[in-house]
Amino acid sequence: PSAEELKAASDAVAEAGENVKALKAAGATNKDDAVVAGVATLKELKANLAAMEVAAGIAPEPAPEKPKPAQQKKGGNNNQNQKKKGGNKGEEGAGTSSAEEVKALRIAKVAQLRDAGAEPFAYRFDRTHTASELQAMHADLENGAEVEGTVEAVCGRVKARRVFGKLAFLSLEDDGGSIQLYCDKKRIDAEEPGAFKRIVDLVDMGDIVGARGTVKRTEKGELSVAVDSFEMLTKSLLPLPDKFKGLTDVEMRYRQRYVDLIANPEVRDTFRTRAGIVSGIRRFLDDRSFMEMETPVLESRAGGADAKPFNTFHNALGMNLTLRIATELHLKRLVVGGFERVYEMGRIFRNEGISTRHNPEFTSVEVYQAYADVSDMLELTEQMICYCCERANGGKLTIQYGDEVIDLGNRPWRRAPMNDLVMEATGVDVMGNFAGDLAGAKAAAEAALRALGDKESMGGIPGVQQAPSVGHVLNEMFEATVETKLRQPTFVLDHPKEISPLAKPHRSKPGVTERFELFIVGRELANSFSELTDPVDQRERLESQIETHKVAQEGARAAAEAKGKEALAEYEAELYPIAMDEDFVTALEYGMPPTAGMGLGVDRLVMLLTNSASIRD
């Protein structure tokens, strides 16, 4: 058999051993059917490998198996515990099921490395090229050829190791790619006697190593570094997740993201894409003369949105503070102060529920432009998202999301008033037929939702019944019957005045504002409006919002009290106040120019452009 065939057989043994380890780590015992089958497969593959090694002349022919005695002393034959030549010598055996046992073995190897004069936690390593650079430089190197005279130095994490006879193959992965280390005992020991044995005995998957040697391509076409010298840079004390199954526990992926990044290279690709999207947003806005600002995270009162804040306490000042729920009001103050184009890429904190679309801590970008209105923001939003998509998607504007194809290149994107979309879905003209008639709007809306009868529509009935205004009825209808069905990019226009306290009234349509929300794949991605600059109107709107919030909370309290102490305690835990931001109103009284603003959820944009199902990804 060839070296490549031996390597393939060794790979199969390693895979079977890893599978058995994974079963035991998950709590399976030697009596479980899966473990019994796995061990049987492992033994068969080991026997096959041993036969191939004998045929290749790199292992002695085994003696004929002697019949077992009727009874065997406790402990058995010590020879049975000796490792066969070849396979994965040096790596933890298949019987090691505990991470703590693996850690103990590896700590012992740390001591052995130090006894041999090596430092298992190095200070630095001078690399000549990354794996991806070498792959590109030697893309045309023929099979079996070696680049003489040029010594390369590479480093990275060992993701696989195969040892048989006087050859060892290590798969090395760095930030940009992977390359194979081709370890020949004769060649390595010529530089440093005993070095090959240390590689075999003391190097495990997960270790971070450095190697120097010449580049070659194996007969099977694998680009490799033929190793002359080898260094341990960081000894890993804990085993990596099963390389064939990866890190599959979702909660562990999120709690130990560093392990997720090691085990799942595609996760690193998502992170890289996110970084490109974020830098793309900044470049897009910088190129259009917007100035990036930084505004306070700690505030005396939460403002700019209706959301429950996180509360904290400032010891030195002796005062209660909240983490910001939006950057809006501080950025508007900057416009009042004379900056005509500003934006902030900021972390936002809302003490609310968690879902695939919501996270208590998230990133948004808010943009404000003086002497502009909502139509300018609509164009800017569409252009910016397309710009980011092209950067993240190789210049293309068609993206795959789940089993859907989203076409961002079909421009201009659809634009439709909220009332028109609800009328299309339900046949009810809320704003046209029920202006000022809350009872009539509720009755018509509830009848329409019951007529549709699907789960989402029926789920909107309680919201309609509790709606404090006709505008709120329209919004409840939209969320129940339209929102999730907006799969392709759609700008929803003309939101009711009651749900838009910071937006200008529409200049030609009564009861609505100059506002849009952008929806893609059924999710809100951006929110924008012509900013309200009339301080008297702004005060009245905020007072109305505060009163509406107060009435809603009183109703919720009464309902909770009727259900008992447990429901009341739950209600009080979710209770939060809304207070007038007098300083913001004062700023408007000094005069803010006509201004358009837009806020975009960066995490949701990344979800869309990376085909991620959850915001936590």
Image (cartoon, helix red, strand yellow):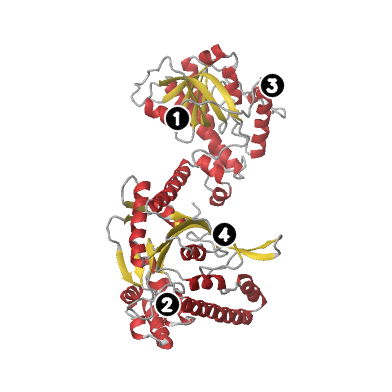
The residue tagged 4 is 296
**Which quadrant holds the N terminus?**
top left
Q: Give the mark, 3 or 4, whose residue is nearer the N terminus.
A: 3
Q: Is 561 drawn above or below residue 406 in the view shown?
A: below
Instruction: Using the numbered discs, state the Cα–Cα distance from disc 2 to disc 1 in whole angstroms.
Output: 58 Å
The numbered disc on residue 115 is: 3
Residue situated in front as seen by the camera: 407 or 108: 407
Q: How far apart are labels 1 and 3 at the CA level?
A: 31 Å
Closer to the observer: label 3 or label 4? 4
**Mark 1 or 4 closer to N-term?**
1
Give coordinates of residue 358: x percent, y percent.
50, 61
- In the figure, is residue 249 to the left or right of 595? right
- Residue 39: name its quadrant: top right
Q: Which of the two marks, 2 or 1, is nearer to us in this view?
A: 2
Question: Separation of disc 2 and disc 4 at Cα?
Answer: 29 Å
Q: Nearer the viewer, residue 610 or 21?
A: 610
Q: Are marks 3 and 2 in contact (CB under 8 Å)?
A: no
Q: Earlier in the sequence, mark 2 or mark 4?
A: 4
Pair 1/4: label in front: 4
On the image, numbered disc 1 is attached to which residue?
A: 131
Does 197 sit left or right of 450 as displayed?
A: right
Q: Position of residue 443 (x, y in %)?
A: 41, 86
In the structure shown, which secondary structural element does the residue marked by tag 4 occupy?
Answer: loop
Image position of 59 with respect to 542: above or below: above
- The residues bearing labels 3 and 4 have C-alpha atoms spaced at a distance of 54 Å
Residue under label 2: 497
Under circle 2, the secondary element is: helix
Residue at horizontal 45 percent and vertical 47 percent from the top = 275
Q: Nearer the viewer, mark 1 or mark 3?
A: 1
Q: Residue at horizontal 40%, vertical 26%?
A: 222
